[in-house]
Image (spheres, coloured by chain):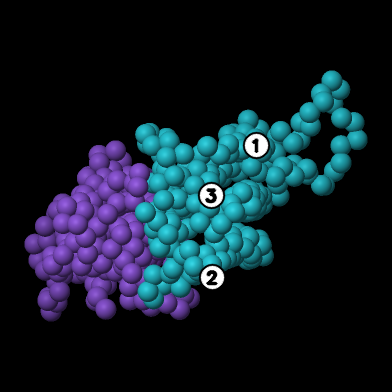
Chain colours: A cyan, B purple
Amino acid sequence: MLSVPPLRHAVNVRQPTSTPRTTPPAGRTSDPDASTVERLLQAAAQAFADKGFHATTTRDIASGAGLSPAGVYVHFGSKEELLFALSRSGHESALRLLRSAIADGDTPAEQLSNVMARFSEWHVEQYQVARVVQYEHHHLTPEHHADVLALRKEMDGLVQTILERGVADGTFSMAESAGSAATALALLSIVVDVARWYSPTIRRSPAEIGATNAMLALRLVGAGH
Amino acid sequence: MLSVPPLRHAVNVRQPTSTPRTTPPAGRTSDPDASTVERLLQAAAQAFADKGFHATTTRDIASGAGLSPAGVYVHFGSKEELLFALSRSGHESALRLLRSAIADGDTPAEQLSNVMARFSEWHVEQYQVARVVQYEHHHLTPEHHADVLALRKEMDGLVQTILERGVADGTFSMAESAGSAATALALLSIVVDVARWYSPTIRRSPAEIGATNAMLALRLVGAGH
């Protein structure tokens, strides 16, 4: 089974750039700002996944991270900036996962199988971050949304390229009337929807869910059993 | 193309049961209460789909329906009751659609194809109601949630039964390691996820999206081209 990094590694922790600290606190080797930002991003992911972006207050996020509301503004100028940091790092992390799943496969079938299995596991294991990544990005400012949409387009393109290479080498065939774009969309729907239906009470393991989705994907491209 | 009923028919308009009107307004044949309830449900669907349940206020819904907040409480005791009315009628409407799609097919392949095509079209044409139906039901009270989960279980069961009948008559085969429950879940993911990715700017017509998803579904069960 793929070891999916926990949230604190999955999100890119950015240092606040406003006022550089001149005197670091004595006796600490780890960076306390970094761990505060991590805690804030985790608290934001949980609050946005539970209540949605609009209903979440900066106070909710602050209290989830054990900070005062003012403590949030040291690191993030607004609730939207928190959503953007989370959304961007979540998409970047998903993109890295897709790239390594492709790099680890020698054939289009192996690559598609790796992508479906690992990306499904990611949606299970990080279902709260995944819900924010998949459902909340339309609440970003237009500029931030454009950044995230570019990452999403890259992800779609990676899956479509696997399909096209599989068709070119004869191992895949597209369903009548469904091109590689529509097929890639259906494949990603199977993966993305995991974040909607998954709950920790479900008995199937992440690896089982991933293996099933990989199997189903190969069928969808005419390469399954 | 299936003609999908507009929202005012898709939701079950319930009459307020509290104080029966003794003197109907003169010169009106239609029931003004019914049309108010319809307007409230439409306004609630739009607000919940846009902002999520938690961030929507009764005032938002009232103003969307051209009423005062007090006017909402004549018909619904709370925001949650509006969500329940919408959620229940949306699920009932989806269930009727599935049943008629099945009744119109002579074979499991035809039935699956009808279900995928028409249910996908419903998710396109009523994507706001579909978003509420698919993503907001966990905000219901435990009792109301149980009612809705029973309807959802019935929908899952209908799809699973088609798959099992297709396997029994030899037209379908399940992917290795994926039973009919996991396959039904993936099929419904392809349909449900339409409500997430669809936007009115998308060029593919509801019928095209439905036809593609029907085609892909037949492949998933080993009966596609």
The residue shown at (26%, 45%) is: B149
Q: Which mark is residue A74?
A: none
The answer to whether the residues at label 2 and label 3 have Cβ atoms under 8 Å apart is no
Q: CA distance from mark 2 to mark 1?
A: 40 Å
Task: Choose the circle earlier in sequence order: 2 or 3.
Answer: 3
Q: Position of residue B132 (x, y in %)?
A: 36, 56
Q: Which residue is mark 3?
A: A114
In this view, the residue in front, A28 or B197, is: B197
The residue shown at (82%, 25%) is: A29
Q: Which mark is residue A168?
A: 2
Specify the amino acid type for callout 1: Arg
Looking at the image, the residue that sits furthest to the front is A170
Same chain for the residues under marks 2 and 1 in the image? yes
Q: Nearer the viewer, mark 2 or mark 1?
A: 2
**For the C terminus of chain A, which image quadrant?**
bottom left
Looking at the image, the residue that sits furthest to the left is B22
Specify the amino acid type for callout 2: Ala
State the image quarter where residue B11 is shown: bottom left
In this view, the residue in front, B16 or A207, is: A207
Which chain is disc 2 placed on?
A
Horizontal side of residue A172 vs A144, given as left or right: left
Q: Position of residue A107 (x, y in %)?
A: 56, 57
Rendered view: A24 above or below A169:
above
Q: Which residue is mark 1?
A: A8
Q: Residues within 10 Å of mark 2 (few under 14, many from 20)?
A: few
Q: Residues within 10 Å of mark 3 (few under 14, many from 20)?
A: many
Horizontal side of residue B180 vs A194, given as left or right: left
Task: Choose the circle earlier in sequence order: 3 or 1.
Answer: 1
